[in-house]
Structure formats: structure tokens, C-alpha cells
Image: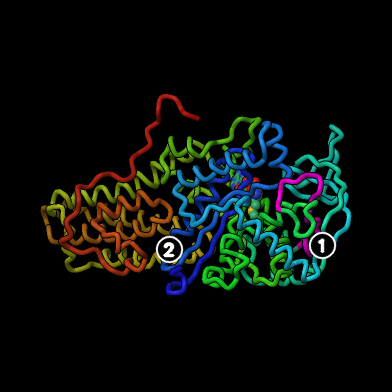
Amino acid sequence: TPAAADARPAFYLTTAISYPNGSPHIGHAYEAIAADTLARFKRLDGYDVRFLTGTDEHGQKMQQTAQKEGITAKELADRNAAAFKAMDDALGISYDRFIRTTDADHYTASQEIWQRMQEAGDIYLDSYSGWYSVRDEAYYGEDETEVREDGQRYSKETGTELTWTEESSYFFRLSAYQDRLLELYDREGFLHPTTRRNEIAEFVRSGLRDLSISRTTFDWGVPVPGDPEHVMYVWVDALTNYLTGLGYPDTESQMFQKFWPADVHVIGKDIARFHSVYWPAFLISAGLPVPKKVFAHGFLYNQGEKMSKSVGNVIDPHALIGEYGLDPVRFFLLREVSFGQDGSYSHDGIVARINADLANDLGNLAQRSLSMVAKNCHGQVPVMGELMPADREILDAAHELLGPVREAFDDLQFHRALEAIWRVVADCNRYFTAQEPWVLRKTDPERMQTVLWTTLEVVRVVALLTQPFMPASAAKLLDVLGQPEKDREFSAITEKIKPGTQLPKPTPVFPRYEEPEALKW
Ligand code: ME8
């Protein structure tokens, strides 16, 4: 592979791998879009990026759902993994590998990490009894459960139904990792956001029990090495996907050497415990470095309500894209919700963003400057004359954006990056209005050219920086600004738009959303 010859710094990011026991929903789309935006940002910012996503296909839940449908777990996985992949492709997710935990190399990787943990003395055989949630694929301690009116026992945290389970099981010596884990949480930046880190640290400080890591009551999983009566607990194999994606167990490969430890695992808040307690403990036990960062994003709700099949408000991502277009949906999700917090989406919310931020603010700025250039400058980028303080101010604001935007991306604060960019868009609209180039056309055509040049230059920088969020729309905008492919990385920000460049006929990039007769959802 060219990885060794590639001097660019590495960046390895992953999403959670989804359970394909149902169809993908907007929560899955949200996570994929966020991770994709980060992957694209890093590529444009000069990194050699590896981006992994996929499906988590083992476990009791998969087997139960398949049984209900009268098909095998593998058939269910095949059907729905295809649906998840189709969703990713429809969303423009630029993954390098779509991993399925039923892939052959994943069995090899999972059995290898198991053996490493065993050699470290961290795995022993015992028997287990406890409250198991099939929905969460997790055991809960008595104190984490409650009996409700129907006489059933439920998890307090997730509200899922629990069943008493007794079986022979292998255990992982999680209790031995308390201090090392607490040390890890003290390390700046391991688990984000801080509220999640505090919760998890509190949980670990209160004491860790050893973890049951195998099952004998069903067989849909990776066989335990040397004891095929047992399959691995689904979370052991699921977490290992992040290593499989780099060719583990070949830790000497260029890919593994370059990309491990991962720069960030992007996951939802409900699985923070698995990623910040179990996963680092498994890795330390197996003698591998732990990831640099785990970022737990919030949940998306439909107009503030939890999505559920019974309420009938589960949104198909394809329907959303069909209604509003892909880029507006990507923009909306990352602009509206602060990453790490819960958020809501609604028809009105999406339409408001499309019409205000995209059509009015950026769309109008591009359209009115470009159509003046088409009419008054022979469709060529005008000449930059002497710059006035107002020109300098808005140009500086645009050229200085990369720093704060990069910082926002380092913290996965996508909405902050967009806020910063859109402040410049708003300032530039004000600048354009105040300069009145349509008046200058008659009174001072040379000055008009400078104002138009300045505006095109700001739009160029804004288009470059919005590429990770709205790849197709930003590309269109760069097309109408006459920017060649090679000038679209962030290193091109410091170059200036060249006077005399012939521009294509300007076409609007961000149309307004017109309310249809009947809403589709
Ligand atoms: O948890 N809003 O799979 P999963 C935002 N297989 N994010 C949401 C969401 C919502 N409404 N609903 C789910 C699993 N998610 C495991 C992961 S990783 C080694 C194994 C997020 O299909 C959820 O938090 O239930 C998780 O990050 C991802 O979608 C997949 O969820």
C-alpha cells in the first residue's frame, strides 16, 4: 500500500457499527453524517484519513428477530446490512471500509484479541446468573433494575425488559482495571463531552465487577477459541471491529502501524460505557494502545419525541433526502444540534434552515455577486483594485476562519464551525449591501470591480470550508467560481481568486424550499 510513502499525518475515525436487526433510521444517519463530515474535513486539511463504518451482526437480539421472521440470523444480517450500506451511500458517506462482523477476517481478529486477553490472565471460566437485556445486549446489577406494575423487571437506565439468565460463562477481569481506567479519564480529552466523562468516572469509581464475556444459550456469535460450546459476548467481538478494520492481528502492517490507536470513535451516548470502560480494558489487557478519543453524541428526537415503531414516527433517511435534498439535511443536522447534546428535528426546523441560512444567506450572496459579474464584467473574475478598510476587514475575517473552524473540528463541535463560517457570510452580505456595487456600476466602475472581487473571494473561502458539510453544493459553488479541482484543499485558502478567470453562467446553488400541497411525512 502507498501508506508508507505517504508523509501526511494519519487520522483514523470510526462510527459505531449498527445492529442490522431493523432498518436504519435518522439516528444512524446522524452519526454517519457527523463522522463523514469530520473525515472530509481532515482529508481537505491534509491528513491521510481512514474511515470505518459497518454493521454489528451477532448476538441474541439478531437471533431472536430472525426467528420471529422465520429466517436465519445470517439472512436477516445480509438483508439489513445491505440496507445500512445503501443508506450510507445515499448519504454520501466516504467510508474506506464497510465492515460486517460476519466477515471472515473479523472472526480471526476477535479470536486473536480473546487469546491475548487470556494469555494476560484476564479470562476465567465460572458460572453466571443475572438480569440480561436482550435489547441492550447487556447484564444489569440488581440495583440497576426495577419491577414495574406488570410484574416484569426492567433496566432503570434504558427501560428495556430483563430476563433472569443463568449459564456457564467466561469472565473478563474488569475489576482489575479500575485504577488504570480512572487514570485514563484524567487524561485530557479521552472521553467527550465532559458530562459523560464524569458519569463514567463515577460509575468506575463505585467499583467494577468482572464481566461475563461468553454465552452458551445460543450460538450466533464468534466461537470462543478452544471452547466452541461458547460464543463470545457480542460486545467483545463488536468492539474488536475497530482493529479488524486495520488488518489486526497483523500489527506490523503499514496500515496498523500508521492508524492505530484510533483518533476518535464517534458513538452515541447510550454506548459510552462499552467504549470507555470495557474497550480500553480489553485493549490494555491485549497489550494494545487505547484510542485517543471517544466522542459520545446525543440522541435525535422527532419533534422532541423519542422515535419508536409503535408511535409511527420513525423517519426513513431516504424519505428525508427525497424531500429536502441531501446537502440541506446534512447541513441541518450539524447546524441545528450541538454535537454531544440531544436534539430534535422537524419539518419546520429544516425548512427554516434551508430558507434562511442556505437560500437567503449564502445562496443570495453568491447569486447576487455572480450575476453582477456575469452582466458587468464579461463573466470574468473582476480586477482587484486598491483595497479599502472595509474590503480588508471582510477578507481578513474570511482568511482567518480556518483556525477557529479547525479548533471546532478538533472538539467535534460542528455547529460552532458552521456558526463561525455563517458569521462571515452575514458580514459579507452586510458589506455587499453597504458598498452598493449596483450604484458604483455608474459612479465608480473600478471600485465596483474591487467590491465584486472581494465578495467572490469571500464566497470562495466559504465554499472551500463548507465542502465537508455539503460536498455536492460546495462543489457546485466552486464550479461557478471557476475553481479547478486541484485548488479545493484548505491549503488553497491563502491563495486568492484570480482576476480574469472566465466563469460559467451562474446558476443558483441553494434553492428555496417551497411548501408542497401535502407533506410527505
Ligand atoms: O448500539 N439518535 O447499535 P445501534 C442518535 N451495535 N443516535 C442514535 C439514535 C438516535 N435516536 N439511536 C441510535 C449499537 N443511535 C451497537 C454498537 S459499536 C462497537 C456497537 C446511535 O444500531 C447509537 O448511539 O443500536 C449508536 O452509536 C449507533 O446509533 C448504532 O446504534
Q: Is residue 74 above or below residue 40?
A: above
**Residue visible at 33% across and 53% down?**
475
**Residue visible at 15% across and 52% down?**
379
Question: Within the magenta stretch, is there residue 73?
Answer: no
In the picture, the disc for residue 43 is 2
Q: Nearer the viewer, residue 104 or 68?
A: 104
**Residue 228 percent across, percent down from the top left:** 77, 53
In this picture, residue 200 sits left or right of residue 384: right
**Which span of residues is magenta-colored?**
202-222
The CA distance from mark 1 to mark 2 is 40 Å
Mark 2 Cβ and ligand 1 under 8 Å apart: no
In the picture, the disc for residue 208 is 1
Q: Nearer the viewer, residue 311 or 264?
A: 264
**Residue 108 percent across, percent down from the top left:** 65, 60
**Residue 449 percent across, percent down from the top left:** 16, 59
Label 1 Cα crowd, 10 Å radius (few <14 / some 14-19 / many 20+) = some
